[in-house]
Image (spheres, helix red, strand yellow):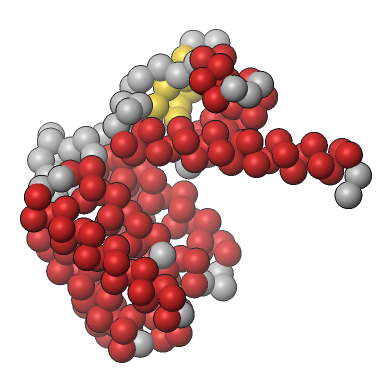
Amino acid sequence: MVDGEDDKLATSKVVTTVFEQILAAVHEGTLLPGERISDAALATQFGVSRTPVREALQRLREIGIIEASPSRFTRVAVVTPEQTAQAYVVWLALYRALIEEVVPHVAEGTLEVLEEDHAQYLIALTRLEVQQIATANFLFFSRLPAESANLALQRAIVSVVHIVRLGSLHLPEYIDLEALGRAQGLLLEGVRLRDVQFARDAMKLLAQIQVPQE
């Protein structure tokens, strides 16, 4: 591999690391909606140049986590309950297409991870630990897209799921967390049995969950 390719690979890894750390900070509530972001400050924090930070921020803009106005501000996106509800409708439509493709042949390793995610969700639910609930739910529903051979579908789901998650963390009231847990259980049973009908029932239950509005 030539030096130029080595440099590009190294830069790409740095960008990915910065991207993932900023995204994690947003979902953990360390960075809050509307909070201003400085690429210079982030570069200092991560010990890197401003170039990979700017590229990471651009990627976050592309999935709607960061919003910016030229020469004015770069900040964590403010996702309204209405926007969350709209993104949720899109996610449901995409996930319905996903389960039709992947549920009949999900790998055993993925099933085991789904079972662990669901168990963690139920534990967090009994303790009403909101961040842990959100994380376990996000992880649970993030496993199946990787089973798809449809890269366009994968990208579309990723592009909307982070908006749903960010918006869900800042709703005026909790969504029906019990129903969400039951939907996970139905989907998990569908994967265990390779039975799409269970998965369809899970999606019907998810569609009944209302996103609280202001």
Q: Evaluate whether residue 118 shows in this view.
A: yes
In the image, 26 versus 33, the foreground residue is 26
Q: Evaluate whether residue 176 shows in this view.
A: no
Q: Which of the image's four quarters has the C terminus?
A: top left
In the rendered view, does 21 fall on the left or right side of 201? right
The quarter of the picture where residue 80 lies is top left
For the point 10% across and 48% down, the residue is 128
In the rendered view, does 116 fall on the left or right side of 208? right
For the point 38% across and 51% down, the residue is 161
Q: Is residue 57 above or below residue 86?
A: above
In the image, 172 versus 37, the foreground residue is 37
Total numbered circles: 0
In the image, 127 versus 165, the foreground residue is 127
Question: Residue lying furthest right in this view?
Answer: 2
In the rendered view, does 36 fall on the left or right side of 153? left
The quarter of the picture where residue 139 lies is bottom left
For the point 10% across and 40% down, the residue is 173
Residue 20 percent location from the top left of the image: 49, 40
For the point 52% across and 56% down, the residue is 155
Question: Residue lying furthest top in this view?
Answer: 71
Residue 75 percent location from the top left of the image: 42, 22
The quarter of the picture where residue 197 lies is bottom left
In the image, 178 versus 161, the foreground residue is 178
Residue 189 percent location from the top left of the image: 25, 81
Residue 130 percent location from the top left of the image: 17, 44
Q: Is residue 169 above or below residue 181?
A: above
